[in-house]
Every structure is written in structure tokens, then in C-alpha cells.
Amino acid sequence: MTTWTDRTADRPIPLTAPGGIDREAHHRLDEAWLAAAWSHPTTRVFVVSGGQVLIDDTANGGTEIVMTPTFEAPDTEVHRYFLGTDEGGVRYFALQKDTLPGRMDQSARPAGLREAGLLLSPRDAGLMVHAVALENWQRMHRFCSRCAERTQIAAAGHIRRCPACGAEHYPRTDPAVIMAVTDEEDRLLLGRQVHWPEGRFSTLAGFVEPGESIEQSVRREVFEEAGVTVGDVEYVASQPWPFPSSLMLGFMARATTAEINVDGDEIEEARWFSRDELRAAFESGEVIPPYGISIAARLIELWYGKPLPKPLPVRES
Ligand SMILES: [Zn+2]
């Protein structure tokens, strides 16, 4: 019997920020406190626009979000998000703007989370995820879902209030499940979504439906997409996925059947891979692994037992 252990702790999952920032949610409704925090000389602010921020290279070879003291910030009273305070007492805000500020130097450049999430420190990535998630939610919840009146930003970006009916609306996070399914022979099930580029395979995933437990959701999604029945389901780790507002809940799941029957609608192909088969398929380029920020790569690695092999460089013929 295989016992899964969470080995993600020593290597944080991209977009998750273990420690480092205290969100200080209890201050969000205190306008005087927020004003004092904003005007403090050590406070730092960055602009978020359409899911992007400006990033820049650091002297030691890293990458950071371009931040400024608040007195240099663009004048935006309304779309100001308070993100929290770091261990050194520095407070962070994000300003939502229609455009990013002009480039400050040669190496500063706009980046979305799929790129920046792999480059930034966990602290900066965590700040960016928070800001992008709030921006997405604010953008899509400008009107009251009860009475259709235009809502107003409150609580430093974490509430939208309706001036007509008094309703308060809070940021949405939509749970989704993503699972590495293995069979009796300890092979891994990977699938190809219809719209993915040729060769790309990854773990199956889907949204949790109303009235469903997450374990039920794992079993339903795997059966719907691949026709495989799942028994034991074990939670591994989660990952914020603000594209636009999901939380990915990662699982290892054990199949009780092996016959594959894809839905052909969402998944066009699904296959069982042994470790040797997956390594060979990666190395030959037949299968493109889910590199990048997704928790999918970590789930596959957890089954594989070590970091995934790199594909061989494509040879020009
Ligand atoms: Zn309303």
C-alpha cells in the first residue's frame, strides 16, 4: 500500500505564500488606521491592472514587483487595496488602475501571474495573487446581485456595498478539485483537454458543484471526464488560482477501475502512464508536461517520487 505524504512543505507551491504577510483584516474597516498606514513613509504600493503588475530584475538575480512609497503613487483614492504587513512592519497596498505606470527603467516590464508567479519571491507572489484576485472580483461585481444597483468599494477593497439595499458583497472564491488518479498497478491517469496544444497532458480537474462535497466532486469529475471509478480520495494541498477566482484543491485519488472512456467533450484523450512510460514520453517530446505555476506538476511529482524529467531540446531537422 502506498502512503502519500505532503512533501510540498519544503518546496512551496507557486502562488502560495507561506507566512511573511499578516493581512490584518481587523483594520480594513478602520478608515483612520488605513489613512495612517497609507501615509507612513515605509509603506509600499504597486499598481495592478488587468491582472498584470510591473516586475523588475534585482541586483542579486531575482525578480521583484516594482513598488514605490505612497507619496510617489498615482492619485487613486477609490481603488486602493490594503494587502497586509510584513515581518519588518512594512505595509503594502495595491492600486487598481486602467493602465500600468510607464516603465521606470530598461528592465522593468509588465507581467501576469503565470509568468511572475514563477519568478517572484513567495512574499511578492503572495501580494500579487491577493491584488489580482481582488481586482478580478471587483471588476465582475460592480452591480448588486440583489437589486442591480451599482455597488461601492469598501473595507480597503475587500467588500462591495450596495447603497440602495444595503447588501454587503464579499470576494468570491470558487472551489475546484484537481487530482492525480492512480490505479492498482500504481499507474497515473493523465488527460488532454480538447483545446490544449498537441501533446499536452495533465491531471484531471473540475469545479465543485452546489450541494457536493469535495470528495464527491473528485469522483464525479474523474468518472465524467475519463469513465474511471475512484475509491479513496486523499487531500494533498491547495493553490489559489485567480483566473479569475478559483481555489484549486489538490488530491491523490485511487481508481477502482482501469477502463478509460473519455467524454470527448472536455477531455479528448486520457491515458494511464507507468513512471517509465511517462519519463520516456516526456523525454521524447511525445507528452508535454504541465510545467509552470500549476499545482498539477506537484501532484504528478508526488506520484513520480522526484522532480519531473526535462524534455529533450527539440532538434531542428
Ligand atoms: Zn442592492
Image (cartoon, rainbow, N blue to C red):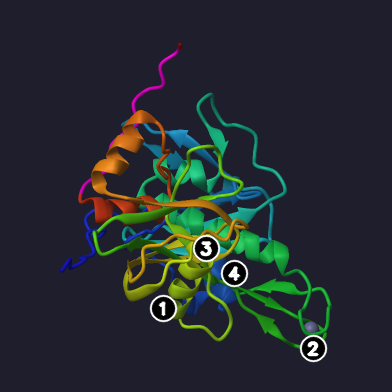
- Label 3 within 8 A of ligand 1 by Cβ: no
Main secondary-structure element of the magenta-colored stretch: loop
Side of 177 where 149 appears, left or right:
right
Q: Which residues are magenta?
A: 306-316
Q: CA distance from mark 4 to mark 3?
A: 41 Å
| Disc 3: which residue | 225
Secondary structure of residue under mark 2 = loop
- Pick the residue in front: 109 or 28: 109
Q: CA distance from mark 3 to mark 2?
A: 42 Å
Q: Earlier in the sequence, mark 3 or mark 2?
A: 2
Q: Earlier in the sequence, mark 4 or mark 3?
A: 4
Q: Which residue: 55% across, 71% down?
A: 173
Q: Which residue is situated farthest in the top direction here?
A: 317
- Name the residue type under label 2: Cys
Q: From this viewpoint, is residue 37 visible? A: no
- Name the residue type under label 4: Ala
